Amino acid sequence: MIKSLEPYTRSILRIMAGVIQIEYGFNHLFAVPVGPGGPRPAAGIGTLLWYAGLLDTIGGALMILGLLTAPVAFILCGEMAYAFFFSHVPRGSILPFTNGGVPAVLLCFIYLHLVTADGGPWSLDRWIAKWRQATQ
C-alpha cells in the first residue's frame, strides 16, 4: 500500500526541492527572503553568485513544474556539489553539519536521484509524454 504512493511522494520531493531552490535564487538575485544571517545585498550582475541565482531560480521553477526534470536535475546537482566544495568546505571542515553545507548536500543528492528517476505523476514531463503517446 505505502509503496504505491512512491511516485506521488517523488513528485512532492521534486516540487519542494524546487521551492527551496527558488528561495536561494531569489536571495542571491534580490536579497529576499532574508536568511538567518540577516539581510545582505543582492549579488552583482555578472558575478558567480548572480549566475548561481539564475540557475537556482530558473532551475527551481522547472523542478516545480516537472519540466525537463532529468537534465535540469543534473545541472542543479552539479551546482550544489560545486557550492558545497567551493563555498562550504573552505570554511574549515568537510563535515556538512559544521560548515553549513547540509542544504547543499541534501539538494545535491535529491537532484542526483531525480536524474535517474522521472519527475513523478504530477509533472509536465509526464503530461507531455502521455499527450505524445495519445497523438501517435
Image (spheres, rainbow, N blue to C red):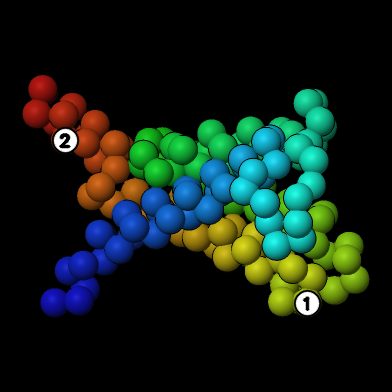
Residue 112, image x and y in percent?
52, 56
Mark 1 touches mark 2? (CB < 8 Å): no
Q: Is residue 89 something that shows in the picture?
A: yes
Q: Which residue is mark 2?
A: 130
Q: Return the residue nearer the eye: 41 or 90.
A: 41
Task: Answer left or right for 133 relative to 10.
Answer: left
Of the residues under marks 1 and 2, which one precedes in the sequence?
1
Task: Answer left or right for 88 relative to 33.
Answer: right
Residue 9, image x and y in percent?
30, 63
Quarter of the figure with residue 96? bottom right
Q: How many marks?
A: 2
69 vs 106: above or below: above
Q: Is residue 74 something that shows in the picture?
A: no
Quarter of the figure with residue 48? top right
Q: Nearer the viewer, mark 1 or mark 2?
A: 1
Residue 127, image x and y in percent?
21, 36
Going by the numbered disc 2, the residue's amino acid type is Lys
Residue lying at 72% horizontally and 77% vertically, measured from the top left: 97
In what element is the residue under mark 1? helix
Q: Which residue is mark 1?
A: 98
